[in-house]
Structure formats: structure tokens, C-alpha cells
Amino acid sequence: MPQPIRVLIVEDSANDADLMLSELRRGGFDSDSKRVRTADELRAALSQGSWDVVLSDFSLPGFGAAAALEMAREMAADIPFIVVSGSVGEEVAVEMMRAGANDYVLKHAMARLGPIVSRELRESKKRQAAERLSQNVLNSLSSHIAVLDQQGTIVAVNASWKLFAARHGALAEIGPGSHYLTISHLAHGPYADAAPLVADGFAKVLAGELPQFVLEYQCRAKSPTKWFLLHTTPLGTEQGGAVVSHTDITARKEAEEAMRDSDSRTQFILETSLDCIITIDSQGKITEFNPAAEKTFGYSRKSVLGLAIVDLLIPSVFREPHLRGFDHFLKTGEGPILGQRVEVTALRQDGTEFPVELTVTAVHTRGKPEFTAFLRDISERKQAEMTLRDSEERYRTLLDRIPLPLFVYDRETLQYLTVNQAAVANYGYSHDEFLQMKVTDIRPSEDVPELLDALTRTGESYEKRGIWRHRKKNGTIIQVEIAAHSLDLAGRPACIILANDVTDGLQADAEVRRTSNLLKAVADSTPDAIFVKDRQGRYLLFNPAASRFVGLPVEEVLGRDDSQLFDPVGARFVMERDRQVMDSGQTETKEERLTAAGTTRV
């Protein structure tokens, strides 16, 4: 089935534009196209529509490919831009490639257009997918995350960071381009206490003096005070830098405090080489050798004409297979590489081998076949692909630097696509085991129907999905708080999940409630007067028997001290005794006469 494509053609010749569209149809594309002839028409087309590729003639009256390229890069930076020209010199073509053109095609060699457009669309999709993945990974995290370069300048932040900054006027300008170390040194107000420690820790991580920097700090910018965990780790790339995350741990800190009170987150590939055009006859002898071929292979055109291509440009290990394939075509008319873009190894005059991208076409002249090969040195592209792999590895490193378990799964099949190291470490499954599993496999079986129902109602962007139960490989059930972000990954609907283990916090809350309820039940049921005070002498608990003793309802006593319940002498005595007990930590038993509400009791 033809691939739909939107093509913007900068061309003053309708016939040439039709020829381009014809070649695209031949290449398997169903083109929705628009032809423009002036700068104003191009600007309007770029602003009004989304285009997959721009095809531009090199020279138009009063306008040309250079101006069109500059406008396209300004208004649609990532759109593939291909120059299609009747004739263009090598230096001009090189300059266009350096200026940002993706490729060029000669109008008398238009057969290359379809394969080139196919390649550039694939490369554009890879770049866009990598960018979306990296930013969506960051945006899916509830922690406030920034990525710093080696100098401490912020190069990227996630959505949570932006939202937090927008809510706090003092932070509104802290984003990409801000120098984090300078900001930390100059911080004042609610951030002043932690700022010097943060700046020092960042500097040591960036300098390689610390493997990581972790700090729990209070943020008093809003009421009530919030607690955050700052976690800084090296970015792990050759360029250096660091990943900084601020995670809200207020709930955990509050749970810990309650327990004490109660129990004790490519480089783009550019191809700048020009195509070599080499023609051979039915005997395999070179009949054409263009300037690009001269520059690439090191031979002059005059020196190679009439010589066998197999002896000059093909490495010795591939010569026998080449001759067999050539002879097979002459006998049968069949050639598996004809019309295809393939990668092979070529040989320079100096004996060095290098990878090339090759397309071969065959035509019959006076009853005999003649072959034209379009070759391109792809050494730089191979290096760029390596750079892209390094870039993908940096994103992989970024995922693994995130301290909370992170999962990416296919929203249609529910199959895991990748997980980070924190998921492997916390759940007990290996990375390969996760890739054989679905999201339902780490849920207790009784929770699966509810999960499947919830997934049918999930949104298309970032959302918090609440607290769910997960099962580790060893069978342990944990409670996790789920944050999710949907995205398109290489044409497939996917979702990123961040799982924050809140099991300890929930258990702590339950224990505090249980202890408090038990204490109140015991106090309310005893006939003796029982009360609890804070260190300032104010009543926190007052049972019914104590209420009857002072002659006041419980709700009127809570929050008061002894001076408001007893006569002055008795109140002073009780307060002094209480202070002695709290300071010494020793239990005392005393009988005293106290007067409250006009009645004296022992």
C-alpha cells in the first residue's frame, strides 16, 4: 500500500514538479503536495501546514534553495530538505549540505529521489522518537528533575519542575539556560538554609569528587512546610554533567515523625558526502567516472576509463561474488541489488576499504546492458550512527540514574518494552525477564480485573493513578503510588510508569491510628482520672473521670493548662511536680488536695 506523504515543492516548473511526484509514486509514496514559487508563498505554506519533506529547485527567479532552506530551518527545523536541481557544482552542493540540506538529487538522475526520501523520513522519525522519549521520560516523573551540563547550567527540566517553579515566584526563572550553582549561592529566604550545602554538593559531583550527593531539606516557601529529597548523580557521558531530582518526601517525613511521637531521570545524523556516479558497460569496464568519484576513490577519470571496475574499486574478498552476480545477470536478466539501496564495502586507490551506500540501475543501449552505480561514502554516517547509539545509551543511563522503579509498556499489548535498574533491583526480575512479561504479571491475581478496567479509562498524558498493589518476584506484596505518562514510541502507543513504594508510610500511619485509638479507649473506660500533657503543660488528652474531677467538659479542658483548672497554690504545685517528672524521667506517686470548680478532692 502506498505510504501517504505531504510534500512541499519549491519549483517554478510545473513539469519538473510533476516529474518529482512521479518518482515519489514510483518509490511507493502517495503524495499530498503543494507547489510554491516565491518566498511569500513558501512562508505561508510552512506556517499553515505540517509537511513531511521539502523538495526545492536550486534556482528560481528572485529566489532559490539557499533562501528556502534558511526559511524552512527557521519555521520547521527538523523537516527533511532535499535540493533537486538540473545542475549544481560540487562546491555549491557541499555548501548546501553544510547549511543544513539533507541531500541533493540531479534532475537527470531522478531515480534516486524515492530512496532518499524514504531514508530521510526514517531518520526524521528516529530523531523525533528519541526526542519525545527523552522528554516524556522526564515529564512522566513526579519528582522535579533538571539535567545540568559540566558547568552547572541547566540544559533540560521536566514538567514537574516547571509546574513547581510556576507556583513559586522566586523560582519562576529557573529553567534551561540558568546556572544552577550561581542560583544556589545567591538563594535567600525559604531556601537559604540548604542552598550552600546544595551548591557545594553539586560542585563536587560535577568535579567527580563525589559519586552522588543526597540531601533531605525543608522548603518553607509554602505553608505547611514541605520536605524534599535532593538526589544528584553524574550524567555518565563524555561531556559530563549531572541529573538533579527533588522528590517530595513530606508524607514519609510526616509518617516517620508520627512513628517517633507514638513509638519512639542524538546527536542528529548528518550526511555531507556527495554521490559518486560510475557507469560500466556489459564487460564491466568503466565508461563514466564523475568528479565526486574521483575525489572519493582517488583516481582521475582519465586513468580509469576502459578499466574493469572489479580490479579497481572492489576489495579482493568480494571480487569473486561480484563476478558471479554480474555473469548471472548477463545470462538471466536477474539482479537482486538492481534498484535497491544497499550497503557494501569499496576500495580506494590507496588500498583503504570504506563503507558505501550503493544503488545500481541497468539500461539497454544498442541491445547491450549498461549499468550506472550511485555510490556515497557513508563513513561519516556510520560514525553518526555510533554517536546516535551513544546518545541512546545516555538516555538509558538517564533512566538508570532515576532512583525509583520505572517501566515502559505497550498500551495495546500491555507488554513491557523496557525498565530501569531500580525496577530490576526492587522487584527481583532481570531486565530480560521483564521484557517477557506484561503489566498484569506483577499484580496479585485478584487485582487484575480492576487494573484492566482502569486502563480502559486512562488519559492520553500525565496522570497520577493512585496507590496499587505490586508483587515482587519473591512473592512480597508492596503498596506503590503510580504516576503515568502516555506517549507515541516509534509509531506504537506506549506508557511510562513510575512506581513509588509507600508501603512503610502506610503501615506507619496505620500503627499511629491503632495506638491512638487504643489509648483513648483505655482512658475512657477507666474510673481513674487520666490525662496527657505536652511539655508546656497543656492538656492533650482528658478522660471522662478527669472531667468529672475538675467539673468541666472534656472539650473545654483540652489545650488549657493547670492554672486554668485549679486554685493558684494547687496549680503551681501540680506544674512543678510535672516538670520534675519530665526532667528526671522517673515515675512519682503523690497524694495531694486540689481544689477545682469550688470543690476540694484528694
Image (tube, rainbow, N blue to C red):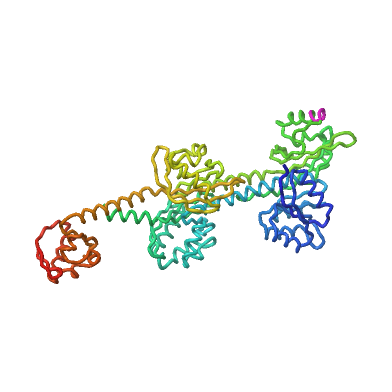
143 and 447: which is toward the camera? 447
**Whole-percent x and y of residue 57?**
79, 55
The segment highlighted magenta reads: 328-332
Residue 16 vs residue 465: left or right?
Answer: right
**Whole-percent x and y of residue 54?**
73, 54
Residue 319 vs residue 245: left or right?
Answer: right
Residue 264 seen in render: no
427 and 208: which is toward the camera? 427
For residue 41: magenta?
no
Residue 167 seen in render: yes
Say which residue appears at 72% left-offset and 31% top-offset.
318
**Which image quarter: residue 47?**
bottom right
Q: Main secondary structure of the magenta part?
A: helix
Can you say which quadrant of the picture contains the N terminus?
top right
Q: Is residue 473 above or below residue 462?
A: above
**Whole-percent x and y of residue 124?**
66, 49
**Whole-percent x and y of residue 432?**
50, 37
**Which image quarter: residue 61?**
bottom right
Q: Is residue 211 above or below residue 435?
A: below
